[in-house]
């Protein structure tokens, strides 16, 4: 299993990587915006992606759609602080498998990833 | 900016620090600030557009940011991670406010600065300042919003 972490914040990328280590991914890579994530995705072909929304270059929801065109079976967990319900609904409409609101804790991230795997 | 709007930000600030560090901040009385900014060592700014126009910022001393990172389990402590972190904190606090202000409360990526002089906000723009203490540190959230 391979994980790609997409977020423009180093703090968040590193936190997700620390918390996700529980799942013993074979490899974890990261990208700091949607455009770089798409390039990395094509080389890396991960099974799971965590995706921020508000990022420079290409926003996360546009990136979700682009990634799903490359590999429709990939599981994408959108992790965003945008707390209006319409954002979460839009993420799911665009094909995300789950939505986690920031700020998150190790416990809430692990629960959200477990729910992806259960699906 | 109404009293209810300010309460939204106060609740979000409390929730953020409680959830990420397990230590609750103590909010003080909001004050209206004009002209000179009260900025500390590191500041993150978010530009607001859409139905509201303006800025939200958080300004924190270096010692507080280092303590926050330590509580989160982050081992890096260089200038780059401090700037990144203050930007991410203000981004999360402001983005969480969309639950109250709605999807037309549009949020930029953060602008960050180190030092007490640099601000992208016009000095003439009046703003509400929310002083708070977290553990022994004093910090500020500033809200300069036009309805």
Image (tube, rainbow, N blue to C red):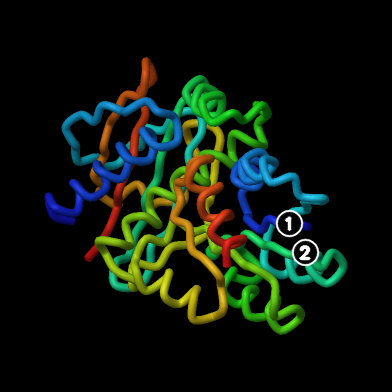
Seen at 62% across and 30% down, the residue is B74
Q: Residue A3 carries which label?
A: 1
Q: Residue B77 carries which label?
A: none
Position of B128 compared to B111: left or right? left
According to the image, label 2 marks what residue? A46
Q: Where is residue A64 in the image (x, y as percent from the top left)?
A: 62, 74
Pick the quarter of the image with the C terminus of chain B.
bottom left
Pick the quarter of the image with the N terminus of chain B.
bottom left
| CA gap, disc 2 and disc 1 | 5 Å
User: Can you tell which quarter of the image residue A68 is in?
Assistant: bottom right
Q: Which chain carries label 1?
A: A
> Do the CB atoms of the residues marked 2 and 1 lie less than 8 Å apart?
yes
A67 vs B47: above or below = below
Seen at 39% across and 20% down, the residue is B137
Q: How crowded is mark 2: few (under 14 residues within 10 Å), some or many (20 or more)?
A: many
Secondary structure state at the residue bearing disc 2? loop
Q: Position of residue A77 (x, y in %)?
A: 57, 63
């Amino acid at each position: 299993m391979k994980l790609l972490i997409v977020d423009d914040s180093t703090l968040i990328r590193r936190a997700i990587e620390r918390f996700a280590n529980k799942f013993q991914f074979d490899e974890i890579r990261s990208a700091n915006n949607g455009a770089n994530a798409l390039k990395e995705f094509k080389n890396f072909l991960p099974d799971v992606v965590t995706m921020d929304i508000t990022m420079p270059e290409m926003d996360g929801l546009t990136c979700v759609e682009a990634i799903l065109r490359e590999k429709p079976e990939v599981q994408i967990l959108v992790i965003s602080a945008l707390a209006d319900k319409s954002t979460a609904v839009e993420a799911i409409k665009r094909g995300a498998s789950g939505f986690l609101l920031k700020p998150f804790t190790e416990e809430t991230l692990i629960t959200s990833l477990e729910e992806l795997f259960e699906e | 900016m109404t009293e209810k709007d300010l309460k939204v930000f106060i609740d979000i600030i409390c929730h953020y620090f409680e959830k990420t560090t397990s230590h609750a901040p103590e909010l003080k009385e909001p004050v209206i600030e004009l002209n000179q900014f009260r900025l500390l060592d590191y500041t993150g700014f978010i530009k607001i557009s859409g139905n509201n126009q303006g800025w939200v910022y958080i300004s924190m001393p270096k010692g507080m940011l280092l303590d926050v990172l330590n509580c989160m389990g982050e081992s890096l402590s260089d200038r780059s991670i401090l700037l990144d972190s203050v930007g991410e904190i203000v981004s999360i606090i402001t983005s969480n406010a969309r639950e109250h202000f709605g999807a037309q409360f549009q949020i930029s990526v953060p602008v960050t600065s180190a030092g007490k002089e640099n601000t992208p906000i016009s000095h003439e723009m009046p703003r509400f300042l929310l002083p708070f203490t977290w553990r022994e540190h004093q910090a500020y959230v500033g809200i300069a919003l036009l309805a």
